[in-house]
Image (cartoon, rainbow, N blue to C red):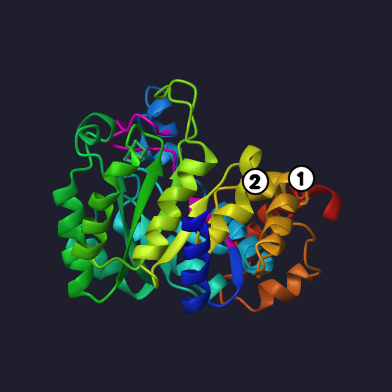
Amino acid sequence: MDLLTQASKTYSENFPQVAWFERAIFISWFCAKPTCKFCFMYTIKDQIKQPKFARRRLESILAEALICRICNWEIGFVSAGIASWNTQDLKEVLEGIYKITGKKQWLNLGTLREKQIEELLPFIEGVTGTVETVNWKIRPDIVPDKPIEEISKMFEIADRHNIKKSITIIIGLGETIDDFPELVKLIDKWKIDRINFYRLVPHEGAMKLPGPTTEYYIEWIAKTRIEFPKLVIIAGSWPDRTEEIPLLLKAGANAVTKLPAIKNFGKQPAINIADGVKEAGREFLSELVHYPKVDIDEELKKIDMDEAFKSKVKDKYLKYYKKLGKHE
Ligand code: SF4
């Protein structure tokens, strides 16, 4: 409890009393190195061999970006498995998202080469190093194809080009809180701008661990907040765990992520998030319960895009909008 009180105090001294929801936009189900033992891509690796066929269509990605803008969900990052998109096609995706949201994006696409980063630079806010665990004994087995040295190299490139850096950490992979000093060392060494914490969610066919308790999960977040008062901390929580939202925020998280938001919009997990933010004494900047009243044609008029393609985005948007169900 003392830890939580201290983390809350540190947060309040450094950030306004707000929180937002953010979601990753997944753009492909292909990964060239599908070897991370916790990952959904690891479980479907035998079904997907061709990057092109596993990609989402551009209109679908952009329709989702439009919903993010309307509901004020931040896009946590644009995410895909390793080597799933070539740089030119990726640039088209990022440019489209930029036109819709007016924002540069974080990328979570494995380690990127300098040429790629240079090409995508006008649309990149930052790059993500998927560290996943700081227990160096278990990491080579759980994350065999994402060496820390490659992440280090990508961050050196990021520094040269003045873009931000983030890392992802999954709690519950077999580490203990005794490993926390290793996380401190990494954050200090790389001078990262933000960290995404996730709780392990067991997928069928992936590693069989139960996932962390809320108490243990928030211990990592709270210690990180106290150690790094100004770091942006994003905390993932799944639909069956949304009762822990007030604790994640009191532990010092700035925002929450990971809820499949279109599927759960207006449903109990989404209500729990909105209520949980209030309970933590913060104002919720995003909308997860009541879909904002918008005229989609007016929204689309604001976007500088080929009219024929806009109509494809609109069709896809309306399909998603139906899924938002009772808010029709
Ligand atoms: S590299 Fe990324 S997408 Fe590929 S298996 Fe690992 S976590 Fe999953």
Left or right: 145 in relation to 166 = left
Tell me the distance, in whole angstroms, between the alpha carbons under discs 2 and 1: 9 Å
Quadrant where the C terminus is found in the figure: bottom right
Category of crowding for the residue at label 1, using alpha-carbon neighbours closer than 10 angstroms: few (below 14), some (14–19), many (at least 20): some
Secondary structure category for the residue under label 1 = helix
Does the Cβ of the disc 1 residue fall within 8 Å of ligand 1? Answer: no
The answer to whether mark 2 and mark 1 are in CB contact below 8 A is yes
Left or right: residue 68 versus residue 46 is: right
In the image, what residue occupies the spot 52% across and 65% down?
8
What is the x, y in percent for residue 263?
A: 69, 44
Write the residue at 78% across / 70% down: 294
The mark that comes first in sequence, 2 or 1, is 2
Amino acid type of the residue tagged 2 in the rendering: Thr
Helix, strand or loop for the magenta stretch, by majority: loop
**Label 2 packing within 10 angstroms: few (<14), some (14-19), many (20+):** many
- Boundaries of the magenta span: 21-39
Identify the residue position indicated by label 2 in the image: 242
If the picture is divided into quarters, which one holds ligand 1? top left
Q: What residue is at 14 percent from the left and 50 percent from the top?
A: 149
Q: Is residue 117 magenta?
A: no
Left or right of residue 254, residue 42 in this image? left
Residue 178: x and y, percent? 29, 43
Amino acid of disc 1: Gln
Residue for point 36% across, 69% down: 124
Residue 84: x percent and y percent?
34, 44
Label tally: 2
Q: Quadrant of residue 249?
A: bottom right
The residue tagged 1 is 268
In this rendering, the answer to whether 17 lies above or below 39 is below
Asked if the beta carbon under badge 2 is closer than 8 A to the nearest atom of ligand 1, the reply is: no
Q: Position of residue 244 (x, y in %)?
A: 61, 47
Q: Secondary structure at mark 2?
A: helix
